[in-house]
Amino acid sequence: MKKLCIIAISLLLLTNFNIELQAERQTKINEIMNLITKEKLENYLKNIISFGPRVTGSEECRETAKYIYECFSSFNLKTSYLNWTASTNFKTYEGQNVEAVLEGDEKIIVFNAHFDSVANTVGADDNAAGVAALLAVAEAMSRFSFKHTIKFVAFSGEEQGLLGSNEYAREAYEKGDEIIVEFNADMIGHAKSKEGERKFRLYATEDADWIVRRIEEINNATVGFKLVKGNISRRYGGSDYHSFAKYGYESIAFFEYEWNPHMHQPADNFSNVNLNYLVNTTRLIAGIIAYLGDAEIEKPYLILSKPKRGEIYFNGNEIYKLKNTATIIFGKIFIEAKADSPYKIEKVEFYIDNKLLHVDYEAPYEYEISKISFWKHEIKVIAYSKGKHSIDKMGVFWINFKPKQ
Ligand SMILES: [Zn+2]
């Protein structure tokens, strides 16, 4: 009886503790959302526009990077320039990304926006507005600490083909960084009609569905947009989110609902940004990042760590690094998956061309296979944890003359 009483009291205390913790977290999220004000966003937006067109490689683009660096530093975030060089269409570009880190555990949440523009415009909506949101959210969140690491990143080279973000995502992938999700803000400040003001677009990769549900909850309790949802493909995409999606990371991209007719035109200026709309879109983004900063990760984190995207292999050994995500394999395939969950990983399944070949119940999750092959195949892994599962898959060119052993 005494034992039962103690259990009952402990349970009661624990429940109370949980309720208190929940309430405390909710207050923190609300405070962060309320720190996103029209004055702040207007100020950041005008400062970024004041540099004029910010074409990657230009002096104006470098000056903008410096401004972003100074803002991040003033929030006491660990700030750095990340220089990159990349070639596309027989042209080589040099640029800078600017990263600010709010340090937590090894799980990473990335929020990014590109600060470069095309030549003939100040790019107010594309994408000074997204950068204003990035700075405002970083400033608000920097007043608090979080369980997980949050990285705020401003990219250049977007307009030339997602160059800055591609370098960033590839480096993170090669280092094995555990990015839980990447959020992209590109064109989030244009709304002319009443309908445009009421709606906001949200595109997500498949395994980010649980985060989308949390965004909906936060949205319904606060800014109350009618959210228009869509899917992110891992094969193509028109903004920096694609760089993360193609390396297997989960991403969520935010866009204004209405088509902006001024995109890449001189009229993409301050007067065509709807500041009240930008306040609400930024608040919602701040709300979900603040929530996730302390949240339990609901779906297993899963990534194919071998073969790696963008490598050439000979019998399991990396022999050459490519600058893209193509993977070419000579000989046997050695597959490794990195799976992580706050709960037990029950199993990891290994598939080739949708055929289940192996199940692993213990880490390290790995499998090797040899069969005669001359062409493209798809490797897929699925990790299961507490009734939920995540998928990662990649295409490989596979040349092998040895049959099954
Ligand atoms: Zn853009």
Image (tube, rainbow, N blue to C red):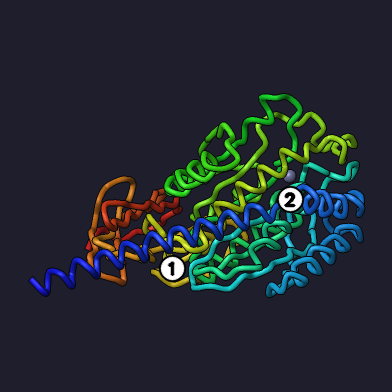
Q: In this view of the protein, which residue sits in the foreground, 52 or 329?
A: 52
Tell me which residue sits at (27%, 56%) in the image.
Answer: 386
The residue tagged 2 is: 37
Find residue 8 and report its horizontal and vertical position in percent: 19, 66
Q: Quadrant of residue 305?
A: bottom left
Q: Is mark 1 within 8 Å of ligand 1?
A: no
Q: Which amino acid is tagged 1?
A: Phe
Question: The residue tagged with tag 1: helix, strand or loop?
Answer: strand
Question: The residue tagged with tag 2: helix, strand or loop?
Answer: loop
Q: Which amino acid is tagged 2?
A: Thr
Does residue 92 show up?
A: yes
Q: In this view of the protein, which residue sits in the foreground, 398 or 242?
A: 242
> Along the polypeptide, which appears first: circle 1 or circle 2?
2
Find residue 252 and report its horizontal and vertical position in percent: 55, 47
Please determine whether, in this image, residue 347 is positioned above or below residue 225. below
Residue furthest left in the image = 1
Q: Quadrant of the N terminus?
A: bottom left
Quadrant for ligand 1?
Answer: top right
Q: Quadrant of the C terminus?
A: bottom left
Disc 1 from disc 2: Cα separation: 55 Å
Find residue 289 and report its horizontal and vertical position in percent: 56, 56
Find residue 398 and report its horizontal and vertical position in percent: 41, 55
Q: Is residue 132 left or right of residue 51?
A: left
Label 1 CA crowd tier, 10 Å (few <14, some 14–19, many 20+): some
Residue 314 - label: 1
Does residue 233 show up?
A: no
